[in-house]
Image (cartoon, rainbow, N blue to C red):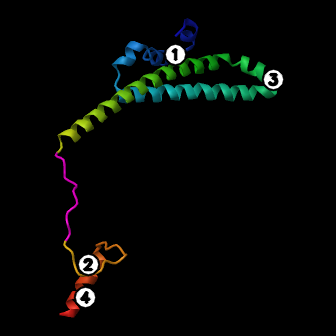
């Protein structure tokens, strides 16, 4: 953060940009990084919208976009500073999230190795004299009820 940008920001915004220092980012976990990312994104959006809105309002009076955007350089500089900060936080968040994903994957693989292995060998079925139908015989509550009803009526 250069001195020119620092002089434009209030204390809260300066503290937000100080929290983007590499030493500070290393201390934060994934949830804290996500929260910081959201806060910086909101401030960046605020100054980006402010810059665009003011520049578009001045285009009609200045008759050119270059003159209207030059008059609003302070908001553009703030938006750019927060954009850089957002990029740093995004990069660190991606690193932490990837490390957490690898850790979870390793835990799941270790748990799978410890779990007993179930045999999936097919069991031999008894041969019946009936021909098998081409329809699958899915057992549902309705089919069970129909079968029981048929059995009961035959007795």
Q: Residue at x 31, y 77 (%)?
A: 132
Q: Nearer the viewer, mark 4 or mark 3?
A: 4
Image coords of residue 128 (percent x, y): 22, 78
Give the labeled residue for mark 4: 150
First-in-chain label (2 vs 1): 1
- Callout 4–callout 1 Cβ contact below 8 Å: no
Q: Nearer the viewer, residue 41 or 22?
A: 22
Inter-mark Cα distance, 2 to 3: 79 Å
| Precedes in sequence: disc 3 or disc 1 | 1
Q: Earlier in the sequence, mark 2 or mark 3?
A: 3
Label 2 residue SS: helix
Return the x and y of residue 78 as percentages of the image width and height.
58, 18
Residue located beneath label 3 in the image? 64
* Pointer 4 or 3: first along the chain: 3
Cα gap from disc 4 to disc 1, whole angstroms? 82 Å
Q: Which-is-in-front pick, marks 2 and 1?
A: 2
Q: Residues within 10 Å of mark 2 (few under 14, many from 20)?
A: few
Q: Earlier in the sequence, mark 4 or mark 1?
A: 1
Q: Residue furthest top?
A: 3
Q: Quadrant of residue 108?
A: top left
Give the residues in magenta: 116-125
From the top left corner, tell me how far across and down residue 59 is, in percent: 78, 26
**Alpha-carbon neighbours of circle 4 within 10 Å: few (<14), some, or many (≥20)?**
few
Residue of label 1: 10
């Amino acid at each position: 953060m250069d001195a020119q940008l620092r002089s434009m920001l209030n204390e809260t915004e300066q503290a937000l940009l100080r929290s983007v220092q590499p030493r500070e980012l290393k201390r934060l976990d994934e949830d804290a990084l996500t929260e910081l990312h959201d806060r910086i994104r909101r401030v960046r959006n605020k100054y980006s919208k402010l810059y665009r809105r003011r520049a578009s309002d001045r285009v009609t009076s200045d008759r050119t976009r270059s003159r209207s955007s030059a008059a609003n350089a302070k908001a553009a500089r703030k938006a750019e500073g927060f954009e850089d900060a957002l990029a740093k936080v995004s990069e660190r968040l991606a690193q932490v999230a990837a490390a957490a994903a690898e850790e979870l994957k390793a835990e799941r693989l270790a748990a799978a190795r410890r779990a007993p292995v179930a045999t999936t060998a097919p069991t031999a079925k008894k041969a019946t004299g009936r021909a098998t139908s081409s329809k699958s015989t899915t057992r549902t509550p309705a089919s069970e009820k129909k079968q029981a009803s048929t059995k009961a009526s035959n007795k």
